[in-house]
Image (cartoon, helix red, strand yellow):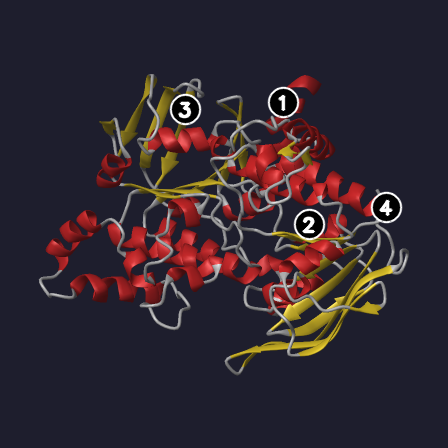
Amino acid sequence: MTRPSPGQGALVIEMAGVSKAFHGVMALRDVGFACHAGEVHALVGENGAGKSTLIKILSGAYRPDRGALRMAGRPIAFAHPLDALNAGVSVIHQEFSLLPERTVAQNVFLGREPTRRGVIDAAAMRAETARALDLLGAPLDPDARVGELAIAERQMVEIAKAISLDARVLVMDEPTAALNEHECAILYRTVETLAARGVAVVYITHRMREVSRLAARVTVLKDGEVAARFDTQPAPQTIVRAMVGRDIADFYAPPATPAEIGAVVLDVRGLATATLRDVGFELRAGEIVGFAGLQGAGRAALAMALYGEAAITAGSVSLDGAPVAFRSPRAAISGGLGLLPGDRKAEGLALMQSVRDNGMLGARAFARLLARRSTHAHAGATYIDALLDRMDVRAASYDQEIRFLSGGNQQKTILARWLALDPRVLIFIEPTRGVDVNAKAGIYRLMRDLARRGAAIMMISSDLPELIGAADRILVMRDGAIVAEFGHGAAEAAIMLAATGEREAAA
C-alpha cells in the first residue's frame, strides 16, 4: 500500500508550542506535532526524549503548562483520559492493561459493555470482538480467558480494543514489541487498512524498518524538544543520527572471531517435550547463538525445557561435558544456567522494590556467593552496587523503586543479577523488547562482553535485524524442531523462508 503523503487528508490532531515541566525539570519544550487523516506519523526518540509525556498530553492524562491542542482545527482541552476517548483519541500502550481472569470480549469492552433491556448483551459483545479480531487477522476466540494467552496474543487483544472504539486518532506505542515477524506483518497490514479508512495514526517505535515501512512523516524528539522533522521518508541512518548522534552500523559489536570461540558448554541431543521434537544443537563458550522462528515454533518452549520449567520426554542435555536434568529453575540456576525473560516486568522484576534489591533477587544464591567472596556485613549491597555501576544502570539512586527506571535500565539490572551469579549459559528472550536504540546498543555490547568472558549465550528474538547483527550463528525453528542454520549477517529473506517452510516448498 502506498503511504499517504502529508496533507492528503484533513488535519485531525495538532499540538503547537507544547511545554511541560515536572518539579522544575522540563520534559517538553515548545513541541509541535500534527497528524492528518489517513496518515501514519512516526514519533521516535530515545527513552526520556519526551515521547511518553507528549502522548499523555494527547490522551488527557496530563495537561500542558503552555501550548495548544487542536482537533480538526478547533481548540480542545482534555481534563481526563475519558475526554480524549470520547473525542476519538485511542492509545494502545506498550504495557498491557488487560484483566487476566476475564475473556477477550470482556476485556475489549471493559467499562463500556453493550446492554439489552438492562442486561449486558454478551452476544453483541462477542460479535463485535470477533469483527475486530477478524480485521487484525488474529485467530482468537472471543470467549478465551486472557490469562491463558501468549504475550503476542494479548497485544492483539489491546489492538482489537482500540479498533472497536472506532477512533479518529490511534496512538500505537511500540505495538510490535512482543510480536514475531508473521504477527508484525499482520499488524502492518492492519495499520495500513486503518490509515486507508482515514484514521490518523501516531506510531511510536524504536524499530527503523517499521518507520520505513509505514510512516509518511517522522518527528524526532530529543531531550524534550523536536530534534528533526522529515516530511519525506529519510534513510534509517538519518533518523538514528538525529536521535543519538551515530549510525546504525555502530550499534552491534563485531562478531566473535574463531579464536574467541571455545569449547562446547551446552550440548543438546534429540531433545523432545510435549511441543519439541528431536532438537539438537551446541553452544560454545564465547559465542552468541540466535534462535529465529514464528510464534509457536518452539523457541520459548526450548528455553523453558532447558531452564527446568517443562518436562523433557526424550534426549539429553550436557553442561561442560556432564549430563544434567534440571527439574526446576532453581536447579538450573545452581547448575549454571541463567534466563532473562521476555516479559521482564511480569517475570523478572519486583517493581515495588529498589534497584539494588532487584539486583539481589535470588537471596540464597547470593548468600552462597558472598560467603565465598566476603565476610563484610554489607557485602551483598556493596557487591551488587559495583555490578550495577559496571552495567551503567542509570538511576537517581539504587534505593529508587525499579518501576521508575527505563526499560533499558531495568534490563541492565537483571543482567547485573546474572553477572553476580556467573552462569555458564545465559538465555536471553527478547533482550531489547521496549528498549530505545541507544540502550539496545549498550545491551548488545554487554552480551558480547559476557561472551568474551567465556559465557555461552542463547538469544531468542523476534527482531530479525537484531539477530542478524548480534548473533554469531542463527538457528531457525519451525514446528518444534530446528530446520536451518545461518552464519552471521545472513539475509532476512532466507531466514524467513526457512521459518515459514517456503524454502523447502520451493525446493
Q: What is the number of the mark on residue 501? A: 1
Q: Residues within 10 Å of mark 3 (few under 14, many from 20)?
A: some
Identify the element where label 1 is drawn. loop
Name above or below for residue 364 compared with residue 28. above
User: Which residue is found at the position 20% from the left and 48% from the top?
Assistant: 365
The quarter holding residue 133 reads top right
Query: In this image, 218 relative to 344: left or right?
Result: right
Q: What is the number of the mark on residue 2? A: 4
Residue 439 or residue 487, whichever sits in front: 439
Q: Are marks 1 and 3 in contact (CB under 8 Å)?
A: no
Q: Are marks 2 and 1 in contact (CB under 8 Å)?
A: no
From the image, state whether disc 1 or disc 3 is nearer to you: 1
Whichever of labels 3 and 2 marks the residue nearer the N terminus, that label is: 2
The quarter holding residue 234 reads bottom right
Identify the element where label 3 is drawn. strand
From the image, state whether disc 3 or disc 2 is nearer to you: 2
Q: How far is disc 4 from disc 1 in space, using C-alphas?
A: 29 Å
- Answer whether residue 451 is visible to the viewer in this image: yes
Whichever of labels 4 and 1 marks the residue nearer the N terminus, that label is: 4
User: Mark 3 sits on what residue?
Assistant: 280
Q: Amino acid at mark 1?
A: Gly
Q: Position of residue 380 (x, y in %)?
A: 19, 61
From the image, state whether disc 4 or disc 3 is nearer to you: 4
Q: Amino acid at mark 4?
A: Thr
Q: Position of residue 40 (x, y in %)?
A: 77, 53
Whichever of labels 1 and 3 marks the residue nearer the N terminus, that label is: 3
Whichever of labels 2 and 1 marks the residue nearer the N terminus, that label is: 2
From the image, state whether disc 4 or disc 1 is nearer to you: 4
Q: Amino acid at mark 3?
A: Gly
Residue 460 or residue 456, whichever sits in front: 460
